[in-house]
Image: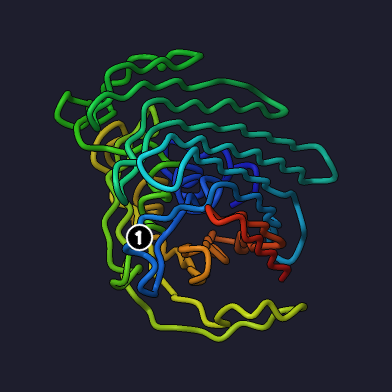
Amino acid sequence: MSLAFLLRRRRAGLVSVAVAGLFATFGPGGSIDARAADGAWPTHVTARYKINFSGFDIGHFTYTSNIAGPAGGEYRLDGNAQLSAMLGAFKWQGVSQATGGVAGHEPAPSSYRFDYSSSAKEGSVRMGFRGGNVNSVAASPPAAPNEDLVPLERRHLTDVLDPLTAVMSLTRAGTGQPCQQRLPIFDGKQRFDLVFQPKGERVINERRPSGQPGVVHVCDVRYVPIAGFKRNSEAEESARKMAIEMTLRPIPSANLLVPHEVVIPALVGTVVLSLDRIDIRTSDRNQIALVN
């Protein structure tokens, strides 16, 4: 399987999983200490991730998160991914943004957009939300009618999250096990769940000691298609069986669980997205910087 094929199989859920798992990256997240109960969300986060395919660096992802107020405020999440492979013959860029409000510990999306362009094509998705339900969807170019697709129904668009807000919800896991959740996601074309199961913990090494815990939670992530996907598709079945691994790093002083690494296996090679640097500003104006 070529890298270009892997990155283009959005219908198969591969890019959707990547977006929900790391391209979406982390919104303000869960804490493992008593401060999680005070509802304090970091006001600003900037992060950079490296993207590696089978030992070759092929791109990066930058992310920013802004929240107005420690609790009950509005949030905006922005991401920009840039990939280049096959000596520049294949290029891909994806820009995403989500907005919404924070009610207590729970984010509630109000809008989502995703714009992408590659050496071969470009497109966009726009969504609006109200009360946890999708109330508007627009895709360009529009999807052609396809009887092989499992049809989307109104019930599939209730109580769902966009990919960015989904990971914001994931990382706000409180004091429980962060790798034991099921996220209902709609990306504008496909309705799917991401199911997380715990695989243990792992010690990590830092280039510069940060004073934060050097242990990550290791999660097994499974993609469960529900609607909008192609029936009896070989690529879809491969995505369904794919064993994705995500590690989440607790940052107690910022009430965060930061996605530290995502490993996505392919038939040939592996895509790895790893945290390079993160800068955090908390509601009490403390600043935290981590460099891996």
Residue 233, percent from left and from top: 35, 41
Left or right of residue 98, residue 33 in this image: left
Quarter of image, res 103:
top left
Left or right of residue 38, residue 84 in this image: right
Left or right of residue 39, residue 25 in this image: right
Residue 22 vertical position relative to residue 213 in the rendered view, above or below: above
What type is the residue that disc 1 sits on?
Asp
Instruction: Residue at 67% x, 83% y: name it.
Output: 205
Q: Nearer the viewer, residue 196 or 166?
A: 166
Q: Which residue is mark 1?
A: 38
Q: Nearer the viewer, residue 240 or 163?
A: 163
Residue 286 vertical position relative to residue 70 in the rendered view, above or below: below
Residue farthest to the front, as pictured = 284
Tell me, yes or no, if residue 187 can be seen here. Answer: yes
Instruction: Residue at 57% x, 65% y: name it.
Output: 261
Residue 138, percent from left and from top: 41, 15
Residue farthest to the left, as pictured = 155
Residue 238, percent from left and from top: 40, 54
Q: Quadrant of the C terminus?
A: bottom right
Residue 222 vertical position relative to residue 177 in the rendered view, above or below: above
Residue 43, percent from left and from top: 54, 47
Quarter of image, res 173:
bottom left
Instruction: Residue at 40% x, 52% y: name it.
Output: 239
How crowded pointer 1 is (Cα within 10 Å; few <14, some 14-19, many 20+) is rated as few
